[in-house]
Image: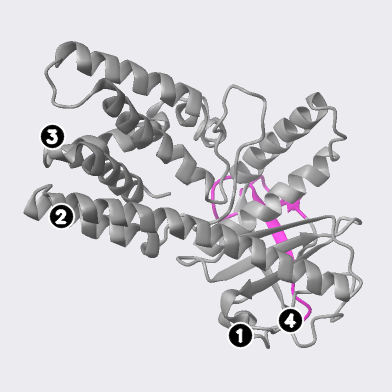
Amino acid sequence: MDSVTQAVLGAGIQGALLGRAQGRRALIYGAALATLPDLDVMMRYPDPVSLMTHHRGFSHSVFVLTALAALLAWLIRRYWPLAPYSGRRLFLTLWLVLVTHPVLDAFTVYGTQLFWPLPRAPESWSAIFIIDPVYTLPLLAAMAYGVSAGLTSRARRLLAAALVFSTAYLGFGLAGRLAAEQRVREAMRQEGIAVSALRAVPMPFNTLLWRVIAKTPDGGYYEAVSGWLDGGARPEWGAPAAEPGGGAAAFGQSRAGAAALVYGRLAAVRPHRRRAGGHRPAHGHGRLLHLPLQNGRARGRRRLGLRHAQFLAVRARRLAAAQARAGTHPEPPAAAAAAILVRAHAALSAAG
């Protein structure tokens, strides 16, 4: 999530739990501490690909942050032994402020290594967009009231209510994702389309509308839009390039489909070659990857920088290695990379 959301979440937690003793300072302490895990972006890496790969890594591990919370609690109690709160309450507050940062990141589409250094794939629960005003604004309003009026009993209750609402909103988003996946899976089953993997990601700034990407056993991809406001309407999807127009004649007629432009199958990924004379393409940084997309009616092209593709390939190799260690049969590297690329492309195109 964005830094503002992380800061107001941390401020809300510390203000609700320690605001009576610390006053307005609790909001400052909580906001500063909550942004601490993202300071890994300031570390020096050999190249931008390594930065993208290792961000949300060790600094977002619940094990590392639990140890840090224990260390900070011990230091505070050592140097301020007369503080009017118990060591347990202090540790709980610091732990919640720190750990909720990576947990909130895990609710987005981008992977977070919650259990580093365990060899697990990054957690990505896709329940909320990376910027969502419905989640952030109640926390921000409660914090603003606490700053202006002081952390009175009423202000602390408002902070607690905002935290309960934000937590419930994450549950609402997760339920929306599961419902969208179920609707699209069932509709495709009724059409006789086999699906080997399916994933929904939220559309920008809301949890009502979802982009759903389905993978078929032969490596094809379908993409659909489904939402809470569809009612009983059957979700529709873009047809793969191998089936021109098939199944997509009425694409976009549902309320969800009319609300957003939907692309279909990721047909191919190929690098852009240099022009004659060795000049690089004029767009972007370095070489570009062209993503031919088709929805059964119109064709479009999207470009994704080579840095993103390299980062996704690293994730694909790590995922295959983790599956091999777990004794499961990993996907071929190309298929795994394509699956991750499609998922990331949906989020990047929605954000851009």
State the extent of the magenta-drawn residues as a range.
Answer: 269-297
Where residue 253 sits in the image (x, y, percent)? 68, 88
Q: Residue furthest left?
A: 149
Say which label, 2 or 1, has the lower sequence index: 2
Front tag of 1 and 4: 4
Question: Label 4: how many residues lie within 10 Å, few (<14), some (14-19) or many (20+)?
Answer: some
Residue designated by label 4: 234
Question: Under tag 2, what secondary structure?
Answer: helix
In the depicted structure, whether residue 247 falls above or below residue 192: below
Distance of mark 4 from mark 3, alpha carbons? 55 Å
Question: Under tag 1, what secondary structure?
Answer: helix
Type of amino acid at the residue the image marks with label 4: Arg
Depth check, front residue: 173 or 191: 173
Distance of mark 2 from mark 3, alpha carbons? 15 Å
Residue occupying image coordinates x 17% and y 40%: 19
Residue designated by label 1: 255
Residue occupying image coordinates x 45% and y 65%: 205
Residue designated by label 2: 154
Say which label, 1 or 4, has the lower sequence index: 4
Distance of mark 2 from mark 4, alpha carbons? 46 Å
Q: Left or right: where does residue 3 sit relative to residue 303?
A: left
Question: Label 2: how many residues lie within 10 Å, few (<14), some (14-19) or many (20+)?
Answer: few
Asked which quadrant contains residue 97, the reply is: top left
Q: Is residue 321 magenta?
A: no
Type of amino acid at the residue the image marks with label 2: Arg
Type of amino acid at the residue the image marks with label 1: Arg
Residue designated by label 3: 21
Question: Under tag 3, what secondary structure?
Answer: helix
Question: Under tag 4, what secondary structure?
Answer: loop
Where residue 226 sits in the image (x, y, percent)? 64, 73
